[in-house]
Amino acid sequence: MDRGRLEAFSDGVFAVAITLLALNLTIAGPGHGTLAHQIGQHWPGYLAYLISFFTIGIIWVNHHSLVSNVAEVTRLLLFLNLVLLLFVVLVPVATGTVADYLGHGGFDAKLAVALYGVVLFGMSVGFGCIAEWSLKAGRTLAPVPPDRRWTARLRFMAGGVVYLAIIGLAFISAPGALGLSGLVALYYVFERTPAVGRAPGSQDADA
Amino acid sequence: MDRGRLEAFSDGVFAVAITLLALNLTIAGPGHGTLAHQIGQHWPGYLAYLISFFTIGIIWVNHHSLVSNVAEVTRLLLFLNLVLLLFVVLVPVATGTVADYLGHGGFDAKLAVALYGVVLFGMSVGFGCIAEWSLKAGRTLAPVPPDRRWTARLRFMAGGVVYLAIIGLAFISAPGALGLSGLVALYYVFERTPAVGRAPGSQDADA
Amino acid sequence: MDRGRLEAFSDGVFAVAITLLALNLTIAGPGHGTLAHQIGQHWPGYLAYLISFFTIGIIWVNHHSLVSNVAEVTRLLLFLNLVLLLFVVLVPVATGTVADYLGHGGFDAKLAVALYGVVLFGMSVGFGCIAEWSLKAGRTLAPVPPDRRWTARLRFMAGGVVYLAIIGLAFISAPGALGLSGLVALYYVFERTPAVGRAPGSQDADA
Amino acid sequence: MDRGRLEAFSDGVFAVAITLLALNLTIAGPGHGTLAHQIGQHWPGYLAYLISFFTIGIIWVNHHSLVSNVAEVTRLLLFLNLVLLLFVVLVPVATGTVADYLGHGGFDAKLAVALYGVVLFGMSVGFGCIAEWSLKAGRTLAPVPPDRRWTARLRFMAGGVVYLAIIGLAFISAPGALGLSGLVALYYVFERTPAVGRAPGSQDADA
């Protein structure tokens, strides 16, 4: 399989998932209080939408960086990619659950954010598996030198560790844990993508 | 990143968003009055559907014109593109809110159209950011000459100004403001796309 | 604009619309009678699903034949294509309305099938506009000779005429009109696609 | 038609179907018991989601192997592909029905799993038709030698036979039949894709 179709399928899944996110913001319609009141109560939904949108967006950007450097698409890579997508498509549902429960507070709000953290953690693990796969010699066009592999690993594992912390933090403070996941997204928007699997001299993902 | 994957992902999002628009027209089914009556009451939905469909369609056409001229896809461009898509995926929800509230009149109808204007304005700003980005020397295959940059800017900023006016106008007349957004779409259907970032001699988007 | 992105966007819309069709078949869940009973009452939904699926499928097959022969994608073609897609995305909603109302009989069933006919007719007109556009000299890689243009026109207009008849027939017999739209789909599955815009010697769409 | 557009359309349908699967996991929201309770009751949904996700994923992987080897895309192949997709888009609905009914037990749970088996069987038949089509001389870049055709046939027919058994088994044990469909998916994750239509020396789908 060439990279083209792996990318096309993944892009399709990313595109559908990112668009379905917005459906969580649907207003119930007349007969459920004034529109202004409904929108006011929806604030956790808007916040969760923003965080999830940019989280998926960033994963998409980094997914491309990784895949564009792959020398040969193997069956194993396809299944690792499916593991990543398994969690990507769960993001709209997990975001909707946060939107529904965060405003109500209590244990349900905490559990909703913890589940959101589980989905983001799963996505991070799926991405990490692809990155780990790509470290082995001969699998990428521009291999990561052996002495820099642990640095690379630390970089793509960092997100996973933070998401793991978010799962625990959710039970102490649901808004705090959600805010932290927003900071992770914000960090990756302004930070450079990890250099894992970047071709030397490649400028393709730099501002 | 090559243009191909940026386009594939964006096309996916545009395609899903434009298809989800139609779901707002779903009929409630037997037990909610006669079908003719339900359809008669749905008129704001059909109007809003038409306007949103062609608005997204036009943004898609112009998005391609811009992106096909990009010399190199950078990380910054990817995130500007995400800002555009952030608002594109909100169009189905905002259209559905207009469809639900316009027929009921009152402040809710005005607020619904104003929110619709906010989403279209955001989309316009997102597009303007990409266009502005493309003006800097070396970023496009066919650069806009420095003395024509302000003309180009005025052209892609005009839509944003009208959408800003629509947000205010909505609080005076909701149907009037919605109609004006329809005129913007109609204008761009019959008018040529702004020449920002068009390769000289390129005929690719002319009739 | 090259053909690639016109095709990618259209394929996205076709793919989403054809997948959303199946959502009309969603079962209401426990508490609405036995599952067997619910499925038994859904028969108009299954029939309408089958007809719509193959109708969209055929339009997709013929859309490709036409577009693959286009010499240059112009702005006018993009907007004619949007008109086609405007009706394609309405098919899931129109199919759902038929599924909901056909079993109830009466005027609502007739109106539902008539509306379904309107959407298929609109799709046919949109397709016919693209085909008509392609007949003008210089617009296709393999032009249709002037003396064969009326034959070509008759072929792509035939479907529209039948769909127009279906709209009228719906008010006499809703199941009969739905059945006729199924026969149109069946006819095009087994018949060759019209030769409009086919490159000479091209075998690409033949069995 | 070149392979590119057949793949793009199919990938779009696979991507939308696999993403819609997750919507079955949507939580009803506050007022339907605690979140923990709702999630606990959703277990058949999570199980069915996992099985369906990997089943569609595997069909997608094998679909690519087959199509990438096709010498010429014919009209017949396009319609065989539509038959496959007809069942692919039914998977989310069938999965949702299993999720809704499995926990309730009784005949409805058995019928839900049997219907799920029917959809997977249909998908398997659709795939088998494409594989059978590809066996005829001249249709693939790397033809299967005549003496190995029956071996190839047995391999791609095996899945269909198991799915047929699942339909029957569902009426004896619904969870057992669902579990067996999970084992089929698991088997294909770890097993190599059938060699039907693989180019000699091709490594593209191997780990």
Image (cartoon, coloured by chain):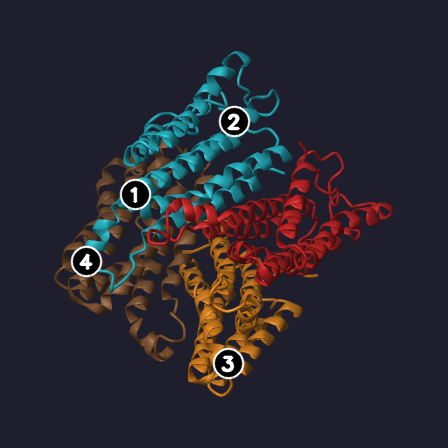
Chain colours: A cyan, B brown, C orange, D red
Q: On the same chain: label 1 and label 2?
A: yes
Distance CA(mark 1)–CA(mark 4): 25 Å
Tally of numbered discs: 4
Say which quarter of the image contains residue D203.
Answer: top right
Query: In the image, B195: left or right of A60?
Result: left
Q: Looking at the picture, how far across and down is residue B159, in whole percent?
A: 24, 51
Q: Amino acid at mark 3?
A: Ile
In front of the other: label 1 or label 2? 1
Q: Looking at the picture, how far across and down is residue A16, in whole percent?
A: 45, 48
Nearer to the camera, C73 or D131: D131
Residue of label 4: B111
In terms of secondary structure, where does tag 4 sit?
helix
Say which quarter of the image contains residue C64.
Answer: bottom right
Distance CA(mark 2)–CA(mark 3): 56 Å
Q: Looking at the picture, how far across and down is residue C55, in whole percent?
A: 55, 67
Q: Is residue D17 above or below residue B108?
A: above
Q: Quadrant of the C terminus of chain B?
A: bottom left
Distance CA(mark 3)–CA(mark 4): 41 Å
Protein chain holding label 1: A
Residue of label 2: A131
Q: Residue furthest top?
A: A147
Q: Are marks 2 and 4 in contact (CB under 8 Å)?
A: no
Protein chain holding label 3: C
In front of the other: label 1 or label 4? 1
Residue of label 1: A102
In terms of secondary structure, where does tag 2 sit?
helix
Residue at 61% in and 60% down:
D115
